[in-house]
Amino acid sequence: MVESTAVAPEVHRDELAVAFDVEVPGRAPARVALPAHDRTSELPLDPLEGALPLRIDRLAPRSSCLLHLALLRDPHCRGGRTRVRRRLYPSARRRRRHRAMDDFEQIRRLVALYAQLLDSGRLADWGELFSAEGTLRVHGRTYRGRDEIVREIGGMQPGPDRPVKHLLLQPVIDLVQRDRALAWTDMTVFTTGPDRQMSIATMGRYHDRLLRVDGRWRFGERVLVFSGEPLPEGVAPVPAR
């Protein structure tokens, strides 16, 4: 005897795995997971002491999949009903892609917050963008640790009557490892003169080494190279592609 059910997820091919929670009366639940692109699989299930044939028929165009799933009644269930709950889970490849996109968005946010918090005078929040042992290199000097970075850079900021604006372009980001990344961001600094008119004060590029610490991306090292300056030794140049 066969119990069957059908699902019609509008999903791209190879991007989903189909997972089943199989419940048989008097037995522990079992999990069946099958990539959506597989046509047929016979999966041994320990809790059921047997194999459950699972059939997948493609009924839709190549761009999507319509799955018809048939689960044979387990011979050990002694007349009880075998229930199948259908669940769709992203495949590992899709999860990795989404995780990478999340990392890019978090790094872009980190880069933007650096400028906005500094321009707003929120130095305590701004300092939290660095790792505890982070460094900032600017004007030929290296500042180490959050306290020194906040103290020294904060002391360089003009008063509220002479606001400064950091204008950033889109960063170039390379994910080097799961918790390591490099980024390059061009920036222009505008200052306010006595006549309240804004003018360009300087331009340059940030060269960043980024770390994921406790689930949050932070600056491990930020080097500001002003336009016309040579690239300091040991600082990675912007990639060619």
Image (cartoon, rainbow, N blue to C red):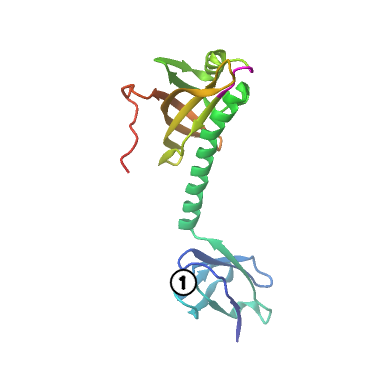
Can residue 122 be seen here? The reply is yes
Q: Nearer the viewer, residue 201 or 54?
A: 201
The secondary structure that dominates the magenta segment is loop
Q: Amino acid at mark 1?
A: Ser
Magenta highlight range: 160-164
**Would residue 168 be found to the left or right of residue 227 on screen?**
right
The residue positioned 47% from the left and 53% from the top of the image is 97
Horizontal and vertical percent for residue 214?
Answer: 56, 35
Query: Does the magenta run of residues contain 59?
Result: no
**The furthest residue to the front:** 195
Q: Secondary structure at mark 1?
A: loop
**Would residue 14 be found to the left or right of residue 197 on screen?**
left
Q: Is residue 211 above or below residue 139?
A: below
Q: Circle 1 is placed at which residue position?
A: 63
The residue positioned 69% from the left and 79% from the top of the image is 80
**Residue 27, quarter of picture:** bottom right
